[in-house]
Image: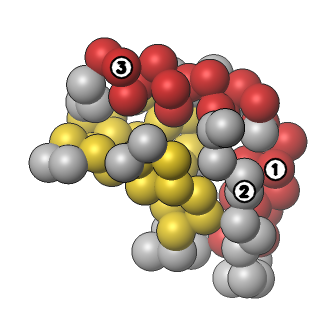
C-alpha cells in the first residue's frame, strides 16, 4: 500500500484498485481507520481523538490532491506524495 503522506506519527496510504467510496487509510500506532475523502470522516476503524482531528484537518486542506490520487490508484498509476501538516 503506497504511503502518500506522514505527519505527527500518522501514516496516510491508499491501495490500488480499492473499493468505493473514495477513501484513504490512516494509521497511528496500533490504530487504523478508513477515511472518506469527500467528508474527512472515519467510516471504518478508529484513531485517537487528536489524530482523528489532525487527519480530518489534513484531508480538508488536501481534498483535491486526494481525489486525484484516488483516480490514479484506480488506474494503477503512480501516486503523488502529499505535503504533511506543518
Task: State if disc 1 and disc 2 touch (CB < 8 Å).
Answer: yes
- Residue beneath disc 3: 50
The picture places residue 30, in percent across and down from the top left corner, at 14, 48
Identify the residue at image location x=28%, y=30%.
47
Dot placed on the residue nearer the N-terminal end, 2 or 3: 3
- The alpha-carbon separation of the residues under discs 2 and 3 comes to 20 Å
Q: Number of marks in the image?
A: 3
Q: Nearer the viewer, mark 1 or mark 3?
A: 3
Q: Which mark is residue 55?
A: none
Q: Which mark is residue 82?
A: 2
- Please identify the quadrant where the C terminus is shown: top right
Q: Nearer the viewer, residue 28 or 1?
A: 28
- Mark-to-mark CA distance, 1 and 3: 23 Å
Between label 2 and label 1, give the one nearer the viewer: 2
What is the crowding at mark 3: few (fewer than 14 residues within 10 Å), some, or many (at least 20)? Answer: few
Give the structural element (helix, strand or loop) at label 2.
Answer: loop
Residue in the image at 60% along x and 64% along y: 4
Image quadrant where residue 5 sits:
bottom right
Amino acid at each position: 500500500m503506497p504511503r502518500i503522506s506522514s505527519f505527527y506519527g500518522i501514516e496516510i496510504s491508499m491501495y490500488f484498485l480499492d473499493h468505493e467510496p473514495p477513501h484513504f487509510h490512516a494509521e497511528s500506532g496500533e490504530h487504523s481507520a478508513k477515511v472518506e475523502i469527500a467528508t474527512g470522516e472515519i467510516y471504518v476503524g478508529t484513531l485517537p481523538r487528536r489524530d482523528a482531528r489532525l487527519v480530518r484537518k489534513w484531508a480538508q486542506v488536501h481534498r483535491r490532491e486526494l481525489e486525484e490520487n484516488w483516480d490514479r490508484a484506480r488506474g494503477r498509476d503512480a501516486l503523488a506524495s502529499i505535503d504533511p501538516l506543518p
